[in-house]
Image (spheres, coloured by chain):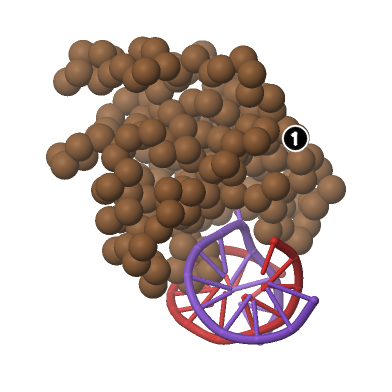
Chain colours: A brown, B red, C purple
Amino acid sequence: MRRYVNNLKSEKGRYIPLTKIFFQCDTLTLAEKLLGVCLVHRLKEGRLIGRIVETEAYLQKDPASHSFNGKSNRNAPMFGPPGRAYIYFTYGMHYCFNIVGGEKGRGEAVLIRALEPLQGEARMRKHRAQSSSKKTFQLKELCNGPAKLVQAMGISADRNNTSLLSGSLRLMSLPRASSEAVVRARRIGISKGQKHPYRFYLKDNPFVSKK
DNA sequence: CGCACGATGCGCT
DNA sequence: GCGCATCGTGCGA
């Protein structure tokens, strides 16, 4: 089982599972480091792979963060160890996927805002059609938003608070092309903490949700 | 292309 | 009640 995943290759090189070491940094650094990392979901029908191209950090003392008012039932995963998923329900119909960062107890996470589909495009389309009023999708529309990528990747709410370092939904690194510059900008869709430049994306990547 | 708005359920004051 | 780390549609430029 483990060998099967570790031997996963792409035209860009061999995938390497992330370990705890990767998360021993501050959450802003983590948000930037996650660019180019791949999210791999192994399903019985096949494997879905998306490369992270856009992230946002949510920190301590950050009024835009769910953790701003302390620990609660909903945000508890943010206060757990880094490398786990924090998945929350919003706007009465959408789920968003985060990766917990920082030291345990800080209450920080990185929102994954967009993926570049690398593998399993047909099934991603199927998943999106099942979860949306829309039924046909351009490649660019599959994962260019936080709730869209959750649909496309088939991530369900019961993954909340589970590790992304092992198991069927996990993070795998891939060498990033050095030509890809990182852009740092303001976060999207928030009313508080708007001035902080806590959003990161790969410059000129067509799968980013917004310029 | 941009902007406005409705859908829809839950956490929190 | 209010607001929400969103999405899709519809309209106008």
Q: Residue at x 32, y 63 (%)?
A: A129
Label 1 sits on a secondary structure element that is strand
Q: How many labels does the image show?
A: 1
Q: Which residue is drawn at 57% across and 41% down?
A: A206
The picture places residue A95, in percent across and down from the top left corner, at 46, 57
Pick whichever, A177 or B1, lies toward us: B1
The picture places residue C3, in percent across and down from the top left corner, at 70, 70
Q: In which quarter of the image is residue B3?
A: bottom right
Pick whichever, A166 or B13, lies toward us: A166
- Under mark 1, the amino acid is Arg
Chain letter of mark 1 equals A
Residue holding disc 1: A184
Quick one: quadrant of the N terminus of chain A?
top left
Q: Residues within 10 Å of mark 1 (few under 14, many from 20)?
A: some
The picture places residue A13, in percent across and down from the top left corner, at 39, 13
A63 with respect to A12 (left or right): right
The picture places residue A66, in percent across and down from the top left corner, at 63, 52
Pick whichever, A109 or A207, lies toward us: A207
Q: Is residue A153 visible?
A: yes
